[in-house]
Amino acid sequence: MLRFACPFCHFQISVEESDAGGRIVCPACAKTVAIPATRFDNGCIIGDFIIQSRIGSGAAGIVFLAQQISLEREVALKVLSHKNMTEKSVATFLNEARAAAKLSHVNLVQSYAVGEDDGYSYMAMTYIKGETLKSRLKREKRIPIDEALHIVQQVAEALCYAWNESRLIHRDVKPDNIMITDDGIVKLTDLGLAMNQKDWSEDMDISGSPSYMSPEQFAGEPLDTRSDIYSLGVTLYQMITGSLPFRAVSISTLANQHFNQKPEPPEHFVPGLPSTVSTLIKKMMAKKPSKRFADMEELLDAIWRLRQITAPSRNLVPDVHTISIRRLNYEIQTEYMNNRRKQERIQRKQRAETKMPWFARAALVLIPLALIAAAAAYFFSDFQRRSLERSMFAHVDAFERLAANPEIPMERLNVESAALIREFTGKDAVRSDRIGRYVLSHINYLLSQRTDKEKPADGAALVSAESTAVLENQISLLNDEIANLKTKVVPRLKDEIDAAVREGEAYHSDLISAQHDLVKSRADYNALSKTREEELAASDEQKLNTLRQRLHQLVITQRFSLARQMLTTELLRSPRLEEWCTEMMRRINFLDRVYAVFSGDDVDLEKITQEEAKAAYIELYGDDGRTAETILCAFETLRGDYDKAAQLRPEDPEIPATANAVAEELVSAARALHAMGEKKLPAMFAKTMSRLPKTPQTTAAAATINVLFAGFPQKN
């Protein structure tokens, strides 16, 4: 017997399963409604629950979003498939329900009800709006360190509660069984393998997920809460590093790794990982239970102490056994921490200033005084130098006037030049070599000019011994200057030039490397952008297929208001699909207009011909500018015959796209029926497939269904 709710008045209707996929008149509201094609379609009733949509499936059964009729609340309804209806599977299923029903904790999924209907065992649980830790890891690869500790802390609190209340061991802690709500609260699910410690026996089956099982769980030894600590440590390792500690093809190899092999240290994956976090993970994953934390209380205390260091703000760390915060906002925390560190640096600087030793404070006073004294000495020396230069220029000018006067004898010039040289080439520190060289060179030039003019015919030298000494002194100074240039200045300039060349070459090399990095980064960015666009396009296409499947069900059951509501909701969620949603809204309105032609009469759309449909439409609306093909195409769409609709409007790409989506949905439903042990395909499947146009996708779908159910009728 198949029970379902009328989509118009929610009256519960019961029909034979052989009528699945057909139509029936609701006894309450007298409207023609479509009978669900399978036992688990939307609207079907199991026990006290109405199925709304499918959430997911696993090895044990299928999970649906359902509404509890008596209490009008949403629940997650887990149905055990016929394929797994063995004595052991039913016992495990009931064990999960009982274990969950006994416990009530903010971090555990609560069980509401368990029962059996028409040979199907089911269990109703809390419906969680969120995602599994596994799906988040698949999307983000790694979890921030403190948030990973935050998640582990909540799971540990759930396990601590289960152990303290019922001595219950979960035995299957892994990311698949950890849910994270939209508010950031962690929920531990799937207590199907949970076992009371006193129920252990030597002949028990080894159960759990091999990648997360403790060594003693592989060995079939008695377990306690430390086994769950090991599995939780593997989960924390995966969240921090982005990979499992042990991976192997066979279970025996994986078990050997858990027994004997040390995992790669997590700090190798995460440079800069605090050593305390690495130590925590290693202790949780110790091979021997005695080396791990003694119980969940000790683990929770260690995590709480560690988060005092890793958390950006201690105010955001919940106390042990108190979950009181929402999902952590790490951007706000990081900003808060930066401001806090800045304040601490300022405070440290102020404390350092107040506690400065006496000699440092004396240095702060003496250094400025020394700088002032040095500046005063420099300015005094500069004043003396300038005074000396003014005096030198005055004496040289006077000597130049004497040398220019031909009446002044050469002997007097020699005496004056010797006195001038002694005056400005002395060993006084104020007199620089530059001044001395200038005086010597200029006096020598003036004397040579007079010597050339007064040179006697026999070439006798008129330069006195003092002039010769002056020239020798000048030559000596020039030789010293040349030697200084060769030994000090030239090598130093050469070294500076070589260093500048090397530095320029290094800068050039860095520039070339930076250019290569920029080109590579730009290429990587373009590749990532392209990949992202492809992923978005694939996601949009998958979402469109799902929407087409839902619209198909709503159209053939004439639920146009729900179709409009769904499109409006999707338009708000996915702005990228705005154009498609707008076009579908226009089509739904037109289909509603076409259906209104027949809604007043108690007639079957299947028995109306195309000519009658076109005539009825024109009679009601007149000539509204639409072609006959458009009207007939809408009529065939209402009947679910996309083959004829495609023939009427071959230029419309949305018709074959919808047909492909319907074919995909039929294949998924056929696989579910086959997995439940069904041997015959419902007639509705064959009828629906025969009404789809032949495209590569529909042809492949027909072949798949043909393999699952031998004898599937093919369309001629």
Image (tube, grey):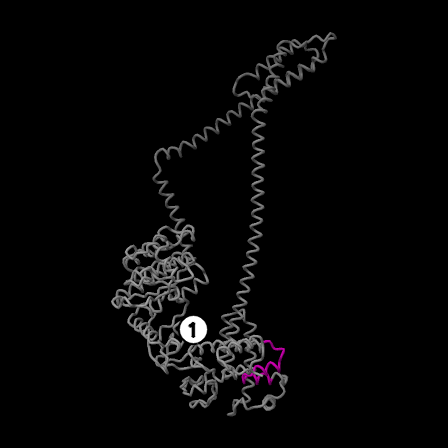
Q: Residue at x 54, y 62 (%)?
A: 531
Residue at numbered disc 1: 55
Would you say residue 640 sits in the magenta stretch? yes
Q: Residue at x 37, y 63 (%)?
A: 210
316 and 535: which is toward the camera: 535
Mark 1 residue type: Ile
From the top left corner, tell me how far across and down residue 485 is, in percent.
59, 24
* Callout 1: SS: strand
Q: Nearer the viewer, residue 437 or 687?
A: 687
Q: Residues within 10 Å of mark 1 (few under 14, many from 20)?
A: few
Q: Residue furthest bottom?
A: 602
Q: Looking at the image, is 514 positioned above or below residue 423? A: below
Q: Is residue 600 a member of the stretch shown in magenta? A: no
The magenta stretch spans which residues?
631-653
Residue in view at x 51 percent, y 24 percent:
381
From the viewer's perspective, is residue 423 above or below residue 248? above
Would residue 77 be visible to someone looking at this image? no
Could you say which is closer to the camera, residue 246 or residue 108? 246
Q: Position of residue 184 (x, y in %)?
A: 39, 64
Q: Quadrant of residue 606?
A: bottom right
Judge from the rendering whether residue 65 lies leftward or rightward of residue 432; answer left or right.
left
Residue 478: image quadrant is top right
